[in-house]
Amino acid sequence: MGPTRHRRPARALTKGGYTVQSGRMRTTFEDVVKWAAAALVGAFLAVGGVYYSRGGQIASNKTVIRVWDWWSPAGYKEIGTYFNTIEHDFEERHPDIDIRYQFIPFGTQYTQKLMSAFAAGDPPDAFQCSVSWARDLYDRGIIADLNDFVATSPDVAMDQYFPITREYLAKDGRIFGVPTSMDSNCLILNAGLCRKAGLDPSPHAIDSWETFVAYAEKLTVRDEGGRILQAGFPVTAIAERSSEIWPWLASEGLSFYTDDMMSTNAATPQGIRAMQLLYDLLNVYKVSFPPGTEIQADNLFIEGKVGMLRGGTWMGYEIFQTAPDLDFVMTTFPPGPGSTERGAITWVNMMMMPKNCRHPKETWEYLRFYGGLENALNMLVILNRNSARLDFYDTPEWRAKVAEHPYLAMLPEISAAGRVAPYKRQQEMDEAFVPFYQRAVLGTMPIEEAMKEANARVEKVLEGSWADQLLREMDKRAEAGQ
Amino acid sequence: MSARGLRTNLTGGAFVMPAASIIVVFSFVSMAVSLYVSFHNWDILIPVHPYVGLGNFREVLFGKDTVFWIALRNTVEYVAMLVPAVLVTSFILALAARRAPFGQAFFKTAFFLPSITPVVVVSLIWMWLYSYNGPINAGLAAMLWPVNAFTGIFGAAPIRPPNWLADPSTAMSAIVLMSAWQASGYYSVIFLAGLSDIPREFYEAAEVDGAGRLRCLWHITIPLLRNTFVFVSVMLIIGGFQVFTQVYIITRGGPAQATEVLTSVIFKRAFQSYGGLGASCAMAWLLFAAVFVFVLIYMRLVRSRQIYD
């Protein structure tokens, strides 16, 4: 039993217009609890402050490496398993390093937080970076060159990965990223629906745009009122990104950007043909759901309401998680009228290290582990994701996984067929391009005119802003100074 | 000032200080910083910020590919549709709630609920309502069925409901309708407060003189609610110029820039482009100027003449 809970009634005084409570009070049990709580909070804050100021090294002599990622266990618990495995395996080999993950949703939230952290001079030690932002961040001089580290680690040298990865991971021979997984835009067929419609779902059965349109028409199911119940191929008309047109340009033998990355191929005859195909699929053949901001083509495919989808090689894992019985095939896009080769878009996201990383040596060890074969196999076993590593496809683990999930067999072919994704100034480029894409696909502007206007806008973006000119000037000065 | 007075003032000042410092730091200092930034080229990741004077303003207003004018036109269109829609709806709701013979508290709560629901949630619900095969179009299709059945006899193509959010000609109206639905309940409560301030005697005298309900509404209620109308419209104009969340969630400015508003352009320029912070701040100040001028003119035109006190 603590001290009595009764207080002596306080005396009320009127002083200077204010009523003041006064009187002698005894210490009660409540007071003791309050002071103890306050002391606890104070001690907690003090310890926390010291802990933070020492870079998280008070509890042990371990070096803390902060890692940001958008792959989050909040979505799928297997992602948690994946990160736990990395943490366990890595820390077992490096007992002096403590890996701390922070998960941030992909997109604007991630970039805003990242930019704020850089601006505040407190970025994470390592972070996963989308190919959409990586080059622009590197150009701003805030990302560490990894050449010296890579030179001492042949297991993660550039020649260990698919050749296309060099386009994304390095600039003028300076390496700034270690690949995470290999991603491609590809064509995904619902094999069950294809068979039901009397169509061959094998990967190369669709061998031209004409065959593709025929497939899309046969896979489209309407009710008596003409309402589409099952779409042959959904076209995202109210798109936020230019990516709808990329694979169709690839199937015409072109990347979205020109080789010098100063313009697009959207206004070329191939680009206009690709745009015309998208317009026709939506408005002439009517094999897509009507345009709508609420249309989530990926989800509709998983629900079995879509015959063919412009999807990604990463989707296999999501499909197995949500619709394990869905029978599907991943393949490349069929060649267009101006090409004989099949097409896809391939890219790699990457792990990066900031220039002002607090523990570069230890962080490199993490990056090296992340980009190595062992982790690539972890990713395969736990998440069904394929790697950018060439030696990955010779392992028994890969062969076993392909036997378990036959769709994976096509992934090396899709990756190899992939054209380059537009990685420079991608967000700004999309902002400039998309309004004209929407006009073209909705038919409110002639396609050729829309593509020419879009191309002109994108060229202006790719010319670079004042910041790019300034950075070029600073580079020149630095070179001259050296 | 006496010692006691000084002490009283200091005590008062100390109490005000926390709130005042928050306002100063997060409003006035931020505004000053944004004004400073608007005169510079600014990239959050580059330590050098060249001074460009009015360059950002020039670029925003007269640049070849500027979307400022498209966004301004869309924003004004949004405000022009929203203000009358909410004024009329919330006024009618207030009258209905006041005259309801029972359940007034229920109606007031029901009207008010949308305004306390997060805009993101409301936007997602309306996206579904507006979808081409969604409930709104299902209702419209049911209403159009007899017409289509009749015209179908003569081989005419059926009339189809609009694709609200995917058609540039209807997307903005759809967003306005949603915003009006959400805002009306809140403003109806303000109108209710205004209605309760009107002395009962005015209506009794009018009734004695033989005035009907419509005459009372026209000659008593509306004139005496003038101040409330002005307040509500000014708040709506200011809020309307700052519309962002519903546009960002529902259309992201599309289709074909039909719903691109000033705040969405400011956001995109600041956070989705490198080096655009200066131009973004310039645009924010232009938005401030537009709202200020708009409200000033409006206040001049409709300023209350203090009909009664």
Image: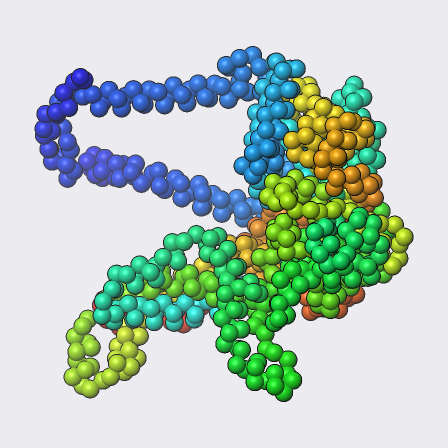
Residue B178: x and y in percent read 47, 63
Residue B278 appears in the rendering = no
Residue at image point 75% right, 35% down: A402
- Does residue A414 appear to the left or right of B218 in the view shown? right
Q: What residue appears at the point 15 percent right and 31 percent down from the top-left corner?
A: A21
Residue A416, percent from left and from top: 83, 40
Looking at the figure, which quarter contains the N terminus of chain A? Answer: top left
Q: Is residue A450 left or right of residue A230?
A: right
Residue at 15% across / 39% down in the picture? A17
- Above or below A87: residue B51: below
Residue B170 is drawn in which quadrant? bottom right
Q: Which quarter of the picture shows residue B107?
A: bottom left
Is B74 in front, or is A333? A333
Q: Indicate the colouring scheme.
A: rainbow
Nearest to the observer: residue A403 or residue B105: A403
Left/right of residue B172 with respect to residue B21 in the rendered view: right
Q: Is residue B151 above or below residue A31?
A: below
Q: Is residue A142 above or below residue B279?
A: above
> Where in the figure is residue B46, as x and y percent of width and height?
66, 37
Quarter in which the C terminus of chain A is drawn = top right
Q: Horizontal and vertical percent for residue B188? A: 33, 64
Marker count (numbered) = 0
Q: Which residue is farthest top?
A: A61
The foreground one among A241 and A383 is A383
Residue A345 shows in this picture = yes
Q: Quadrant of residue B152?
A: bottom right
Q: Residue at x 82, y 34 (%)?
A: A162
